[in-house]
Image (spheres, rainbow, N blue to C red):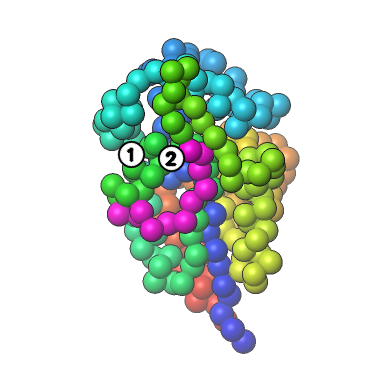
Amino acid sequence: MSRERWAVVLDFDGTITKNDVADSILNEFGGLTRRMINASYNPSVVTEEWVRSMFLRVNETPARLRRFVRETAEAREGFHGFIGRCRELGVAVEVVSGGLDLYLDLLLADWGHGHLPRYRASSRMTKKGLSVRYSYLKGATLDAFKRERVRVHQRSGRRVLFAGDGTSDIEAACAADAAFARSHLWRHMRKRGENVRQLRTFDGPRRLLERACSRS
Ligand SMILES: [Mg+2]
């Protein structure tokens, strides 16, 4: 019998990072209150449309935004070791995010994970503010796109571990073979009675894969 093959699909903001980087930028430079940000986690809000319209309120130089991100963003405990272990175990890892290249590419490169495949929005400063494009969605919603990335790996014969925190992660988490969740996603999954584990550090996902990959 061949060993179980696994893939990992990860949300970025609030999952890989301790805090939601997009929300922090909008709070600091877009004039959004925490209450307005929290309201965006209502499942009726289309995340990518919300992000697109809210980032138009941000009018700062990309250099200033990058400095803020480097000063404030932190990886969740255990993340770097988790990525290293996945490589040793032959587990494919990808990042599927509604966040922006501006900070996501920067942080992954700073942390030595610039090689990870990723889906994220592209951003460009314009006279009207920070303009955000979701070309990878090709008309799909972010929720459906994240779920589809889980399914792509499953169709290639891998089981999938998904980790996320937002309402746009619900469909992907439900489709995954193992789901780790925090915050809004955790509460929704629990309410729906879905099988889910709480994501505190990345030690939980690492242990699950170590066990699963040693099974034959
Ligand atoms: Mg998130």
Left/right of residue 109 with respect to residue 158 in the rendered view: left
**Which residue is rendered at x = 38% and y = 37% of the image?**
103
Q: Is residue 36 above or below residue 213?
A: above
Quick one: label 1, few (<14), some, or many (20+) residues within 10 Å? some
Return the residue nearer the eye: 109 or 63: 63
Tag shown at residue 156: none
Left/right of residue 178 with respect to residue 199 in the rendered view: right
What segment carries the magenta color?
112-122
Return the residue nearer the eye: 52 or 17: 52
Q: For the N terminus, give its image quadrant.
A: bottom right
Q: Is residue 22 visible?
A: yes
Quick one: label 2, few (<14), some, or many (20+) residues within 10 Å? some
For label 1, the residue is: 74
Mark 2 → mark 1, Cα distance in angstroms: 16 Å
Q: For the C terminus, give its image quadrant.
A: bottom right
Tag 1: residue type? Glu
For label 2, the residue is: 101
Locate residue 74, reporting x and y percent: 33, 39
Q: Is residue 72 visible?
A: no
Q: Quick check: is the Cβ at mark 2 less than 8 Å away from ligand 1?
A: no
